[in-house]
Image (cartoon, rainbow, N blue to C red):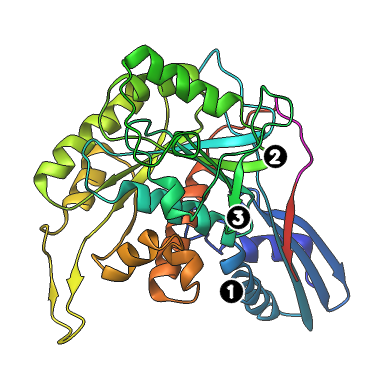
Amino acid sequence: MSPSQSTVSAALAALRDPHTGLGLVEQGSVRGIGIDGGRVAVELQLAYPARGWHEALAAEARACLEALPGVEQATVSVSSRVHAHKVQKDLTPMPEVRNIIAVASGKGGVGKSTTAVNLALALQAEGATVGVLDADIYGPSIPKMLGLEGRPDSPDGKSIEPKRNHGLQAMSIGLLIGEDTPMIWRGPMVTQALQQLLNDTRWQGLDYLVIDLPPGTGDIQLTLCQRVPVSGAVIVTTPQDIATLDARKALQMFAKVEVPVLGIVENMAVHVCSNCGHAEHVFGAGGGERMADQYGVPLLGSLPLDIRIREQADSGVPTVAADPASPLALAYRDIARRTAARLSLQARNKAIGFPNIVISNT
């Protein structure tokens, strides 16, 4: 006897998405069910890039379906489709950028820029089209981390082409000035420069633009929150109390301007000695988790204090690009999936309309 549509749907409803915490049916990922005798075909579509999970999800769904009475063969296709999500009131998304994710910290020295670059590369590895904007006007570091050199092109004398490397589109004030040139600018000039870098760059079909913010809650952060259509924010901290104290200020800033905080990344959580394997919590333990619990936001992941992360960023080939199969790169990719999944739960913005990008794995 052939299984019914409701039986198949009920079986799929029991499968949960570990990145959102919701069931596949509940989050609308079941796009189609076909039944032909003992053969069942199911189409699943995630609302965030998750290329690294597609195969495992398809296998889990097949096993679930083939355990049903009357099912002889199950075929499952998995794809991802990224949507534009709502931003602050009175603002609309940019025409070539579906979503802007701000990466912030209240304190310098926590590895925020390294995390932002690897997050962007990880989102790309999961199947998205991604750009990076370096919003640190006084201390731009993205060009060095991405191995970018030379001034960007300007085809019309008004707009500028983003520089490209490792598959990312990128822009930074560091590409427009000398490496050793200090930016001796007051606040209004800095905020104007940020807006020009964002709006005058010819971004092309981005699913996500990751903005690497300078530390603190000053002019640049305020400008970003008030004038830039941000879909969500990620807070980077280390476990120590001093770092989480400042990170709380960044989190509260986004809350006050109604930018959803997608979660917290705990960087430098543990150091493992490369010689003896001894694990030590150099900056304390559990600070990110305690902060996440206090403010009711998820801990997206914890990253170790590892010399390779620093060396690879300094060389212009960050970890996710340098060693994509390494445990470190896979940790960044897990954080990227969780970040994008959290954003996918936000309300959508239908005011943007460039062609949809579908990532499939059959």
- Give how far apart the Cα atoms at labels 1 and 3 are: 14 Å
The foreground one among 181 and 84 is 181
* Residue at numbered disc 2: 204
Asked if residue 71 can be seen in this view, the reply is: no
Question: Going from the N terminus, do you reach mark 1 or mark 3 first?
Answer: 3
Q: Most extreme residue toward the bottom, as rendered?
A: 276
Report the mark closest to the observer, 1 or 2.
2
Q: What's the residue at 27%, 25% (across, down)?
A: 217
Tell me residue 119's x, y (percent). 45, 53
Amino acid carrying label 1: it is Ala
The foreground one among 73 and 165 is 165
* Residue at numbered disc 3: 49
Magenta span includes 355: yes
Check the picture and name the quadrant holding the N terminus: bottom right
Span highlighted in magenta in the image: 351-356
Report the mark closest to the observer, 2 or 3.
2
* Residue at numbered disc 1: 56
Check the picture and name the quadrant holding the C terminus: bottom right
Q: Secondary structure under badge 1? A: helix
- Give how far apart the Cα atoms at labels 1 and 2 are: 31 Å
